[in-house]
Image (tube, helix red, strand yellow):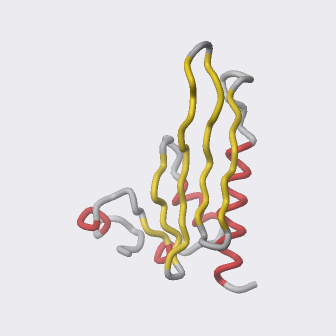
């Protein structure tokens, strides 16, 4: 399996794992949104909690220039570490939600 296919598979496994977690109410669904042509991946919550509309992104990941970019992590989960456990090397993971300046102090790629 080539690198791009491996990274796509790892991201989809990660999102499927989190999709399986049950929301606090049955009226909220957890959906995986994928665009494998452009390599955009999201996990979103959508539905209702009482009379309040719920819609939001939990995770947003992209694959750009052979690296996995974590664009957004709206949870307290360490998904970069989980991607490493799935087989993606740290030098191919970019914490896109951090400023380029702060990325130099992490164990992950700058860009």
User: Split into 4 quadrants, where in the image is the C terminus?
Assistant: bottom left
Residue 76 or residue 54, whichever sits in front = 54
Towards the viewer: 3 or 38 = 38
Looking at the image, residue 60 sits to the left or right of residue 24; the answer is left
Residue 108: image location, x then y, percent: 42, 69
**Looking at the image, is 13 positioned above or below residue 53?**
below
Indicate the quadrant where residue 79 lies. bottom right
Query: Who's the residue at 54% across and 75% down the image?
Result: 89
Between residue 110 and residue 57, name the one nearer to us. Answer: 57
Task: Residue 90 in the image: state x and y as whole percent.
Answer: 49, 72
Which quadrant of the view contains residue 102? bottom left
Residue farthest to the bottom? 2
- 25 to 21, vertically: above or below: above
In which quadrant will I find the N terminus?
Answer: bottom right
At x 61%, y 59%, the residue is: 41
User: In this image, 93 relative to 50: left or right?
Assistant: left
Residue sitting at x 66%, y 73%: 37
- Left-right relation of 47 to 98: right
The image position of residue 71, as x and y in percent, is 45, 58
Q: Position of residue 36 (x, y in %)?
A: 67, 69
């Amino acid at each position: 399996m080539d690198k791009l296919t491996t990274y796509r598979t790892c991201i989809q496994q990660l999102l499927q794992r989190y999709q399986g977690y049950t929301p606090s109410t049955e009226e909220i669904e957890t959906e995986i949104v994928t665009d494998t042509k452009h390599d955009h991946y999201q996990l979103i919550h959508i539905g209702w909690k009482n009379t309040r509309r719920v819609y939001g992104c939990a995770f947003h990941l992209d694959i750009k220039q052979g690296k996995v970019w974590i664009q957004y992590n709206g949870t307290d989960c360490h998904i970069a570490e989980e991607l490493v456990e799935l087989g993606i090397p740290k030098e191919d993971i970019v914490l896109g939600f951090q400023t380029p300046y702060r990325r130099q102090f992490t164990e992950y790629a700058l860009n």
